[in-house]
Image (cartoon, helix red, strand yellow):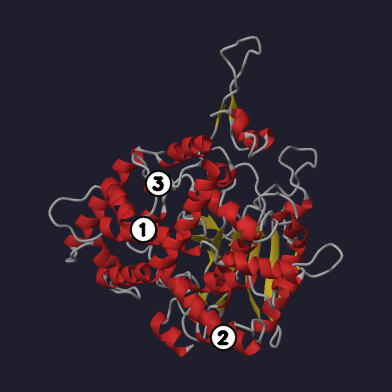
Amino acid sequence: VDAGLVETVLPRQVLESNGAIYSSTDPSDPIASSQKVQLTADTPITHSIQSFAPNGGLRKEVYMESMSSCPENLDVLDALIDARHQLAQSLGFESYSHRFLQDKMAQSPQAVFAFLQDLQHRIKPVYKQEMEVLSSVKQQLEGSAEVEPWDVKFYVKLLKAQAGIDPNELAPYLSLSNCLNATQILVQQLFGIKMQEVELKVGERWDINDDEDPNSTRFIPKEEQIRKFIFWEEDTGRELGVMYLDLHPRPGKYTHAAHFTVRCGCLKNGPGSEYQQPIVGKYSLHTCSSSPCSVVFHSHSHHILLRQRIICLQPCFELALVCNMNTGQASFSSHQEVETFFHELGHALHSLLSRTNFQHLSGTRAAMDFVETPSHWMEHYAWCEDFLPLLATNANGEPIPEPLVQGLSRSRNKFRFLEMQSQIVLANFDQIVFGARQGQRVSPKEVWALIHRQSGVPFADGTHWFTNVGHLVTYGAGYYGYLYSQIFASGIWNELFHKKSMERMSGEKIWKKLLIHGGARDANVMLEDL
């Protein structure tokens, strides 16, 4: 693509640090009128260009390349669909979806389709209004009212910026230290839990070697290194578990936000025995020392839930939360990063605060259409008007001004239904390709195009973004669970935390009636009990 156009969005050093390759040009060559740059299909780059490039031609070029990448995965997905269908039928199920859903909250494909159809019916008028707004603005700026798929992110960002707040005005209030201090206060007030930072032991870290030379290219500044927190119950002094934070990008690191359970909690030797405390973390597969265990990873960025072998540390519940703050500094580059942090923190608290007999039912090892509920619940704190003055303060300790709080509040739901409609499209697609068959298997590409057109979601022929959606492997027939969980989380917030976001009674209730059970209790019963 044209390097000059790309650099109106991202500077050269950012592009090169993300794998971009510039072509060599001869200034005396009249044919080489502009330098070209070859970009990677990494989400941060393509997302930035589609969101902020004023040139529609550049947005289209990047969109078409990124949304038609990995064509070899079409055959892989076909083979996966066939294998799952054969497995399900050999076990007496009509389809893979029927088999997968038998022990989930929805229980059947019919119930999932009914949920998605009802949700789509409810949001249709507002979705149509939002699309009309995009169309009107595009007509004014480009002379064309037809909203193409590569236009959506750009015009949504543009209109949100106009109606909301200036990101530069918000930035001074989004420091990592403020976020962690506010989190410590939050868990203390909600649950009576002390979140204490401690130094990592020798051999415990995975970002750099303990004896790394400060002059080495691998060396990481102290403020960007992995951090460790121990959770204590204040009343009893009981240690509940360990959380690692791996928040900053570095070469070779996983590029998205995630929660990893390094070791689940459980009774070590049956009833009455010692409890194995959980170890959790924000981000990163890593190797430590001692005994092997499973890693469960939950991603906020439409990637995978994966299980790998890993070596863990101590006899306690440990967890790693992994993010990649775009600035690489001790501050968040956007409010969206703050929301992502709290989303993953919700998963971490689910793992840390559960107490189950068996580790395969601990924390986030719950029904897939329920497991995102705690993380969506915690997202509300990034927007909560009661909590924001504590969460967002500047270098002088001054809380975020009320106009900025109100601006954030206004921006939260603006164009929300465009995103929701896209989620409904993907959830329907997921159900159809893994669902019952009438004769031959349907073509995923044809289903993808048909659902977009039926839903009124902009679509470009030849694209197949679903070949990059790892959740079709790990959340196959369960992608609707994100929407399901959002509704549960909103109900919990409105019932227990709206205007009382820091109250101990509300925190105790969600801990003792929901989080503590992990996946060991029927989710329907837990929600009714709340």
Q: Label 1 amino acid?
A: Val
Q: Earlier in the sequence, mark 2 or mark 1?
A: 1
Image location of residue 276, percent across then percent down: 56, 74
The Cα–Cα distance between marks 3 and 2, rounded to whole angstroms, is 38 Å
The Cα–Cα distance between marks 2 and 1, rounded to whole angstroms, is 31 Å
Q: Earlier in the sequence, mark 3 or mark 2?
A: 3
The numbered disc on residue 496 is 2
Image location of residue 155, percent across then percent down: 54, 50
The numbered disc on residue 465 is 3
Residue that label 1 marks: 425
- Compared across the picture, whether 156 is left or right of 93 comes to right
Q: Secondary structure at mark 2?
A: helix
Tag 3 and tag 2, C-beta contact below 8 Å: no
Please state the total of marks drawn on the protein image.
Answer: 3
Residue occupying image coordinates x 59% and y 18%: 33
**Is 36 in front, or is 228?**
36
